[in-house]
Structure formats: structure tokens, C-alpha cells
């Protein structure tokens, strides 16, 4: 095999690109791909695992919830095998949701550590409780931690009602059972009606392995992914943005009726709003554009709850339309919302509202702000609209369709490797430490968003990975979608003959 990728070699385009068993590869092409991997000296199990992992997209998510000071963070440290979650003998140390990678019995998943959940609380405690509630909504399964030495409290009973409403698989952890004498305390938790309590000592590790086995039984191999487009239903659009940028006004305008309350006060919308909208000759579902809880009325929580409802909307959608106030400077919160949509792997459209109110000076400075503040998402379609007058609403649907098309784009493996060969020849990786790592071959393992796995002879620097992503966009488009590029490096061992 030559060092250079061969466009007409064993990776040429062929049938079977739509197969499910091997992600983007059908059986025939998968066999050719694995033969190339063998010739290049890669471990075939590692190659197959890399393709399968990338094809599945994000890992399944396990949320760890419970009231304050029951040992959630200590348990999370047991799950991830290192002391990373902050632990103190004080209730409420953990406030935000924190996500960690974990592995058990050869299966990888994400663990979300949450703050303590309490009912009928205000201020920062209410924010912590809302974070835990969202963690449950976004998770594939839940570990509910109860202090077995205290027994089931009224707050624990309230969490049980929350879990039943969410309908997610639950594993009940009876924590602080340090020896056989505590088993009877754990058995009392059958009364919660969540099935078998698993007696555990998160502090000493007792019983955590058995409980993790139970977690794997309820945790899916791959995360839930129920996008409407796959079944022929309406495509799902999240209309998101910081408070008072005009989301409700825009939704009313595209719906051609007053579907939601509009007020100058930021955060007027408090209940989830899922709307079927006829727009551009097609039917769309605008998902969960609200979600502030009615029982929390504190002004200081506005930004916090804006991020919560944004995350919930993005979780359910295929494409995120981020509405920005063109009359205001691009804020840190705007950037966070955009980053949230990108990190979630959703297609992205940027809609600049109140465009009709701008004078020439503001338009000039807005363009400079977009270049400096949003350069990392220059690939996202942009529309300039007015929710008040309906200006340029007809441009919204083509932008959404463009983003979805990029999100679903698949590059045939042969064409991808021909491109990689030209890229390596014209712009090789810089020499580091007397060595020059090379991209040997690659494949697209999945779509929604496009996910690529590249196989290399050595470590590929972050800057060169960004260059590869930029060139992939120049060559294949991918307008309106994030793309994920992972690299697997050949182990240092003798090449197979």
C-alpha cells in the first residue's frame, strides 16, 4: 500500500452505502474497508468499534438525582472511577448539571450529576431543582439516590411522582448501607414503588458494581432519537433565543394568528408551546419554545430559565432557529444558546429579528459583530426578518430546508478518500518531533449531524483537524450543520503482512 491514499483503490465508490449494520457502510464496502484497515496495520476490532461508536452519535445519558446530601456526587465518582465530582459534607454543593463519561462492562455512557431536588423552594434552590428536572427529561435512564439511614422522606416521595410523570427507566439506589446491618433499612424503600432498592455504599464502593449491572439493563445501547422526518411527519423546529428577542411574535407571525401571549416583559411565555405550522407550503412542528415554571417568579432567574427552556427545545428538535435581536449587540447569552444547539448536533439557522428598525450605521456594526463573535458558525444560513411586520418570512423555510439538507448529507466513502488523498498531498500535516503523521483513510459513520472517522498514522493536531473540517465544508457543503470529526491513531506495533 502506498503512503498516499489511492482514489481508485479498494475504497472506490460501490453499492451498499445505505446499510444499517455498519453505520454508513453496507456489507460489501465494509468488507473492503476492513481489508484496507488490515493492510494499514490497524486493529480491526478498534476500527469496527470506532465506526459503530461514531455511527451511534452521542452516548446514552444517565441522570443521578435525589434530594440534597444523599451522596449523589460520591456515587458519580464511583461510576466514573475517579474523584472528579465535588464532594463535601454540606448539602447543596452541586448546583449545575455536570456531565462525565463513564464505562462499565465494556459499555460507555454519560453520567449527569445534578444538584439536590427539593420541593416548594425559591431562589437558587429553585434553580437547582429545575436543573434536576431538566436532567431527568433529557436522560435515557435515571438513578434515584435515597439515604437508607433516613428512609423515604416527603421530598423523596415528591421525586418519585416526578419520575413517574417523566416515564423514564429508574434504578433505585439505597445509599449509605455500609454493612449487612443496613440491609433492612434498604428493604424499607420498597415502599417507594420503584422496584428493588439496590443497597450501596457510595463512600466505600460496596454494592456499586451490582447496581451498575442493573443500570446497563435499563440503559439503551444508543440514545433515543425520534426525529419526525424519519417517519414522514412534520419536521421539528426549535425556535429559541434569549428572553424578549421576539420568539412569540415570530411564532404568531408564521402561524398567522395569536397562538401565544406577547408582552414587552421578558419571559412572558411560561408553558411549553408545541405548534403545528403551515409555512412555505409545508407542515412544520415548532417545539417547546417556552418552559419557565409557573411556580418560580424571581426576576434573577430569567437568564437561567431561558437556558433551561432552550436546552429542552433543542433536545426535541431537528433544527434550531436561533432568534437574535439585531438592534442589540450580540451577547454572551446569544453565543451560549448557539453553542448549545451546535453541541447538541442540531441543524442551525440564525434569524436576525427587528431588521426593519436598523439604520445604516447599526447594520455596519452588526456585520462586524457577526464576523468577530459568530465566526465559528459562519456555515449557518442567515435570514434577516421582522417578526412585527412579517418582513422576509418567506426566506425562513428555504434556510431551514438548506440546514436540514446539510444535516442529512452523506459522502460516499470512495469520494471521501479521494478528497482526503488530495488534501494530504496538497497540505500535509506539519512535522512534529521529526515525524509527520498522515491521514490514511476515513469514512462517514453517520448523519444528523454528519460524523466522520479518520484513521491516521500518528496524533493529528487540533489545528489540522480544524483545517480538515474547513476543507470538508468547502468540498461537500454541509451548510447549516455541525460536523463531527474523530481520529483514530494506529497503535505502535509491527504492521500485519
Image: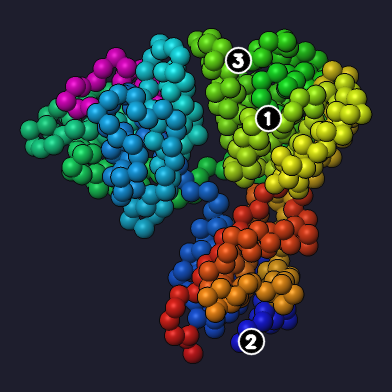
Q: Which residue is rendered at x = 77% and y = 36% of the image? A: 369
Q: CA distance from mark 1 to mark 2?
A: 50 Å
The residue at the far left in this view is 181
SS at badge 1: loop
Q: CA distance from mark 2 to mark 3?
A: 62 Å
- Callout 1 crowding tier (Cα within 10 Å): few <14, some 14–19, many ≥20: few
Is residue 140 in sight in this rendering?
Answer: yes
SS at badge 3: loop
Toward which corner of the image does residue 266 lie, by quadrant? Answer: top right
Image position, residue 482 (x, y; %):
67, 49
Toward which corner of the image does residue 89 lie, by quadrant? Answer: top left
Numbered disc in front, either 3 or 1: 1
The residue at the far bottom in this view is 497
Any mark on residue 2, and which?
Answer: 2
Q: CA distance from mark 3 to mark 1?
A: 23 Å
Numbered disc in front, either 1 or 2: 1
Q: Which residue is rendered at x = 40% and y = 11% of the image? A: 120
Mark 1 vs 2: CB contact within 8 A: no
The boundaries of the magenta stretch are 147-170
Relative to 33, 394 lies left or right: right
- Callout 2 crowding tier (Cα within 10 Å): few <14, some 14–19, many ≥20: few
Closer to the camera, 262 or 192?
262
Q: Which residue is mark 3?
A: 270
Relative to 64, 297 lies left or right: right
Q: Is residue 155 magenta?
A: yes
Amino acid at each position: 500500500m502506498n503512503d498516499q491514499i489511492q482514489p481508485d483503490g479498494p475504497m472506490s465508490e460501490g453499492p451498499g452505502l445505505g446499510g444499517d449494520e455498519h453505520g454508513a457502510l453496507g456489507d460489501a464496502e465494509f468488507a473492503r474497508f476492513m481489508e484496507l484497515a488490515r493492510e494499514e496495520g490497524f486493529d480491526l476490532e478498534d476500527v469496527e468499534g470506532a465506526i459503530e461508536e461514531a455511527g451511534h452519535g452521542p452516548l446514552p445519558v444517565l441522570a443521578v438525582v435525589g434530594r440534597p446530601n444523599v451522596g449523589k456526587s460520591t456515587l458519580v465518582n464511583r461510576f466514573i472511577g475517579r474523584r472528579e465530582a465535588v464532594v463535601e459534607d454540606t448539602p447543596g454543593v452541586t448546583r449545575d448539571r455536570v456531565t462525565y463519561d463513564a464505562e462499565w462492562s465494556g459499555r460507555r455512557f454519560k453520567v449527569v450529576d445534578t444538584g439536590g431536588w427539593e420541593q416548594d423552594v425559591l431562589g437558587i434552590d429553585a434553580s437547582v431543582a429545575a436543573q434536576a428536572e431538566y436532567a431527568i427529561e433529557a436522560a435515557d435512564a435515571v438513578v434515584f439516590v435515597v439515604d437508607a439511614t433516613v428512609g423515604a422522606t416527603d421530598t423523596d416521595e415528591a421525586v418519585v411522582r416526578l419520575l413517574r410523570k417523566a416515564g423514564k427507566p429508574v434504578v433505585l439506589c439505597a445509599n449509605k448501607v455500609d454493612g449487612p446491618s443496613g440491609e433492612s433499612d434498604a428493604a424499607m424503600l420498597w415502599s417507594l414503588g420503584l422496584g428493588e432498592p439496590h443497597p450501596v455504599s457510595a463512600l466505600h464502593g460496596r454494592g456499586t458494581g451490582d447496581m451498575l449491572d442493573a443500570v446497563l439493563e435499563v440503559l439503551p445501547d444508543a440514545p433515543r432519537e425520534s426525529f419526525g422526518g424519519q417517519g414522514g411527519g412534520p419536521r421539528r423546529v426549535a425556535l429559541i433565543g434569549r428572553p424578549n428577542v421576539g420568539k412569540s411574535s415570530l411564532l404568531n407571525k408564521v402561524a398567522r394568528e395569536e397562538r401565544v401571549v406577547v408582552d414587552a416583559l421578558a419571559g412572558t411565555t411560561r408553558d411549553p408551546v408545541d405548534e403545528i405550522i403551515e409555512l412555505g407550503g409545508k407542515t412544520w412542528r415548532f417545539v417547546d419554545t417556552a418552559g419557565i415554571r409557573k411556580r418560580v417568579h424571581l426576576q434573577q432567574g430569567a437568564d437561567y430559565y431561558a437556558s433551561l427552556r432552550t436546552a429542552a427545545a433543542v433536545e426535541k428538535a431537528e433544527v434550531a432557529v436561533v432568534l437574535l435581536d439585531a438592534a442589540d449587540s450580540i451577547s454572551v447569552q446569544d453565543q451560549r444558546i448557539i453553542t448549545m444547539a451546535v453541541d447538541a448536533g442540531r441543524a442551525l439557522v440564525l434569524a436576525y429579528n427587528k431588521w426593519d428598525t436598523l439604520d445604516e450605521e447599526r447594520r455596519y456594526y452588526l456585520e462586524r459583530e457577526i464576523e468577530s463573535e459568530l465566526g465559528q458558525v459562519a456555515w449557518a444560513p442567515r435570514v434577516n426578518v421582522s417578526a412585527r411586520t412579517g418582513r422576509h418570512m418567506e426566506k425562513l423555510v428555504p434556510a431551514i430546508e438548506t440546514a436540514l439538507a446539510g444535516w442529512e448529507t452523506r459522502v460516499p466513502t470512495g469520494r471521501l478518500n479521494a478528497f482526503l488523498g488530495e488534501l494530504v498531498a496538497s497540505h500535509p500535516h506539519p512535522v512534529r518531533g521529526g515525524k509527520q503523521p498522515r491521514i490514511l483513510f476515513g469514512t462517514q459513520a453517520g448523519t444528523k449531524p454528519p460524523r466522520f472517522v479518520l484513521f491516521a498514522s500518528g496524533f493529528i493536531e487540533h489545528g489540522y483537524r480544524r483545517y480538515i473540517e474547513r476543507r470538508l465544508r468547502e468540498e461537500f457543503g454541509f451548510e447549516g450543520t455541525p460536523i463531527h470529526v474523530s481520529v483514530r491513531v494506529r497503535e505502535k506495533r509491527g504492521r500485519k503482512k
